[in-house]
Image (cartoon, helix red, strand yellow):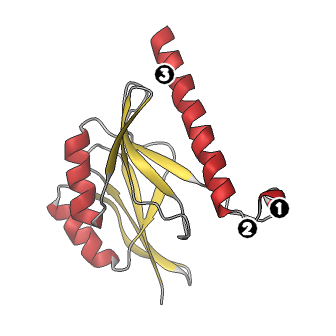
Amino acid sequence: MTNRNSSAKSLAAWVLVLIALVIAACSTTGSKMMSTKNNPALYFEIPVLDMKRAMMFYERVFGFDFQLEEIHGNEMAMLPFEMDGAGITGSLARGEVYQPSLNGTLIYLRTEDIDETLKRAQSAGAKILFPKTKAGEYSYVAEIQDSEGNRIALMQPLK
């Protein structure tokens, strides 16, 4: 149990450092960092049991390229990140503290064509949990179960 707590604390420390770096990078000036209005979400981790299987799923469905890292004994497949880009980034994460689930936090991944993404997801083995549905005046949404058992939402902005 001490090893698990130590790993969790180390990982939490790494995530806090990453968040601080992202905040600093997104801020127009260091001195205005606290007064600049930013979206509060900066980084996410999607728990996986089988990194190779999960990477193949997300590459097939979304076309993501990953950079593999080991951070505090955890296997991480980092999603693309552009310092000047909009939005947040994250990683696929495998380690003792990571357990895929249909419950808990739900992340929405953007797609330009939700119908095509749903087709690719199904052909990659995903289960449709919530079908394509219009969400007000802003977007279409849907939810899938990924290769690892996580509930992942899709969002396509209305044009």
- The image shows residue 36, relative to residue 4, as above or below, that is below
| For residue 16, side relative to residue 27 (left or right) | left
- The image shows residue 38, relative to residue 135, as above or below, that is above
Mark 3 vs 2: CB contact within 8 A: no
The kind of residue on which mark 1 rests is Lys
Measured Cα–Cα span from mark 3 to mark 2? 34 Å
Asked if one can make out residue 1 in the rendered structure from this viewpoint, the answer is: no
Residue at 31% x, 53% y is: 66
Q: Secondary structure at mark 1?
A: helix
- The image shows residue 80, relative to residue 45, as above or below, that is below
Q: Which residue is mark 2?
A: 28
Q: Which residue is mark 1?
A: 32
The mark lying in front, picked from 3 and 2, is: 2
Q: Where's residue 75, x and y in %?
A: 34, 35
Q: Secondary structure at mark 2?
A: loop
Mark 2 vs 1: CB contact within 8 A: yes
| For residue 75, side relative to residue 8 (left or right) | left
Q: Say which mark, if any, is on residue 7.
A: 3
Residue at 61% x, 40% y is: 17
Q: Residues within 10 Å of mark 2 (few under 14, many from 20)?
A: few
Q: Nearer the viewer, residue 97 or 146?
A: 97
Measured Cα–Cα span from mark 2 to mark 1? 7 Å
Residue at 28% x, 35% y is: 49
Q: Residue furthest top?
A: 2
Measured Cα–Cα span from mark 1 to mark 3? 34 Å
